[in-house]
Structure formats: structure tokens, C-alpha cells
Amino acid sequence: MTLGGRSVRVVTLAFLKAQVDVNEGRYGPRHRRLARPGGICGFWSEQVPFCYKVPVAMRMTNESKLALLRKGLLEFLVLKILGAESLYVPDILRRLAVTEFRTQEGTLYPLLSKLRREALVQYEWKESDAGPPRKYYQLTDTGRTQLSALDEYWSRINRTIATIGN
């Protein structure tokens, strides 16, 4: 790889950390670091150029930013859905399926377990006409308090965004 017409070597993050540990305090005015698209490049000294390429998986795209936002809001939506009535997991999944927050059992069950450990939801077994008993989830009093606080916070966020405006 070249940087400014000079040949540089691509190194790993572990190598960079080791170099920082070994050379700590040795950088003079000749030490430079440059942010470059997809990596960090610079010179340990005039004789030792380096370039660290950030793996593609570590770069945050717009889609991954939106995915993080959706993931953070999923807990709020599940509490909101359960705030209305006691529901069976496939019913929760059906409600989410028609939204931006569609998810799978593999995501929902761990979230419900987390909410249960935090005493925000509880479940009860109900007999089913179509097979074995089913777990129906519902909010606890603590869950209703949490939902109320989240609703209020969401309203404040929306007002702030509207105030900041266009």
C-alpha cells in the first residue's frame, strides 16, 4: 500500500497497540497519524510507516445505525403491546410483523426473559384448544410504571425533535 508516494505496511490493531506500548513517549514532532477512509495511517517515525485498515464489519453504515435504533426501541414496543392485553408470543410477533420492528422468536424470547428477570412482565399458562398449554405474557405493576415512564420520555423526545425542526 502507498501513502503519499511511500510504501507502507498494513498492520493489525494488536501490532499497533504493541508498538504504542513499546514506544510510549518516544514520538517526536515527526510522528504523524492520518485518518483515512477505511483505516488509520501514519508514521511511527520517518523510517517506520504504518497503515491499519478498519475491517468492514467494524464500519458503521446507515443501515446498521438504524438497526441499533430499532433494537433499542423493540423493548419499548413489546412493553407497549403487552400494556394493552395479555398475549401469546406468536400474537406479539404478528403485531410486530407489519411494522419496521418485525422480528423472530429467537429475538423475542430472550427479550421476554430479560423483561421477566427485571420483573417488568410475567406469564401465566393458559389451556389451548389447539394443543398444549400456552404462555401468555402480561405487564406487572413495575412494567406498567416503566411503560408510563418510557411513554413520557418518548413524548419529550418527539417534542424536542419537532421544536428543533426543519
Image (spheres, grey):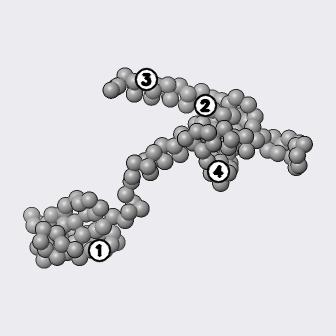
CB atoms of marks 4 and 3 within 8 Å: no
Instruction: Give the residue at x 43% y 23%.
Output: 159
Q: Mark 2 belongs to which amino acid?
A: Leu
Q: Counting residues from the N terminus, which is met first, the one under dot 2 or under dot 3?
A: 2
Q: From where the camera sits, is residue 136 visible? A: yes
Image coordinates of residue 78 in percent, x first then y, are 63, 38
Q: Mark 4 belongs to which amino acid?
A: Gln
Residue tagged 3: 159
CB atoms of marks 2 and 4 within 8 Å: no
> Which residue extends farthest front?
98
Instruction: Give the residue at x 70% y 29%.
Output: 84
Q: Nearer the viewer, mark 4 or mark 3?
A: 4
Q: Counting residues from the N terminus, which is met first, the one under dot 2 or under dot 1?
A: 1
Q: From where the camera sits, is residue 48 visible? A: no
In the image: residue 111, left or right of residue 40? right
Q: Secondary structure at mark 2?
A: helix
Answer few, some or many: residues within 10 Å of disc 1's Cα (few below 14, many 20 plus, some between 14 and 19): few
Q: Mark 3 belongs to which amino acid?
A: Arg
160 or 3: which is nearer to us? 3
Image coordinates of residue 156 in percent, x first then y, are 46, 25
Residue tagged 1: 11
Real-space Cα separation, disc 3 to disc 1, in angstroms:
47 Å
Q: Secondary structure at mark 4?
A: loop
Residue tagged 2: 147
> Which residue extends farthest left?
29
CB atoms of marks 3 and 1 within 8 Å: no
Q: Counting residues from the N terminus, which is met first, the one under dot 3 or under dot 1?
A: 1
